Image (cartoon, rainbow, N blue to C red):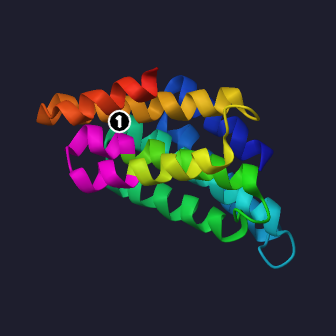
Amino acid sequence: HSLGTLYALRYERSGEEAHARRAEENFTSALEVRRRETAPSDWAMTQHSLGTLFYRRYERSGEEAHARRAEEHFTRALEEYRRETAPSQWATVQHSLGNLFLSRYERSGEEAHARRAEEHFTRALEKYRRETAPFQWATVQHALGTLFYRRYERSGEEAHARRAEEHFT
């Protein structure tokens, strides 16, 4: 897992696909030991790391296959990171899914992606409260503001502008 994390960082910094492939290989190898049956939390962490890697690849390339893989791995992580038993990790993955769907909306303009982004960001706010997690709360509020700003840009609907203002404020 640590080698996967190193290569993922190298990919983020350089954009070299060879680093992304090495990260994927190492995360996948880690899953041979970090099995859901014996180490569920570690398994979920590696699934989230794979999701983040594919999200970054999508951000660089725009390849929808990377977005689908990111969604798949984030969704797997939620099989163990449940709101009731691992609320912080659950909220982190919800935020990651929100970012993924925001990015997909920004590229495609598909309203379905915007709605999914809003759903995941809103779920993250179930855990990220201003009083208890102010940084995370503000980060998600900013992401929601960005989402509604982008929707306003595309549609011109004043309701989206008002929602963006609410979240940015």
Name the residue at 59% across, 48% down.
124
Type of secondary structure dominating the magenta stretch: helix
Place of residue 57 in the rendered image (x, y in percent of width and height, measured from the top left): 45, 42
Q: Is residue 114 magenta?
A: yes
The amino acid marked with disc number 1 is: Leu
Place of residue 44 in the rendered image (x, y in percent of width and height, measured from the top left): 72, 62
Give the structural element (helix, strand or loop) at label 1: helix
The residue at the far right in this view is 38
97 vs 33, nearest the viewer: 97
Tell me: 29 left or right of 15.
right
Q: Give the magenta-colored segment's residue range.
A: 102-116
Q: Is residue 85 above or below residue 135?
A: below
Name the image quarter holding residue 84. bottom right
Instruction: Give the residue at mark 1.
Output: 147
* Residue 25 visible at all: no
Name the image quarter holding residue 139. top right
Name the residue at 49% across, 52% down.
120
Q: Is residue 75 magenta?
A: no
30 vs 112, nearest the viewer: 112
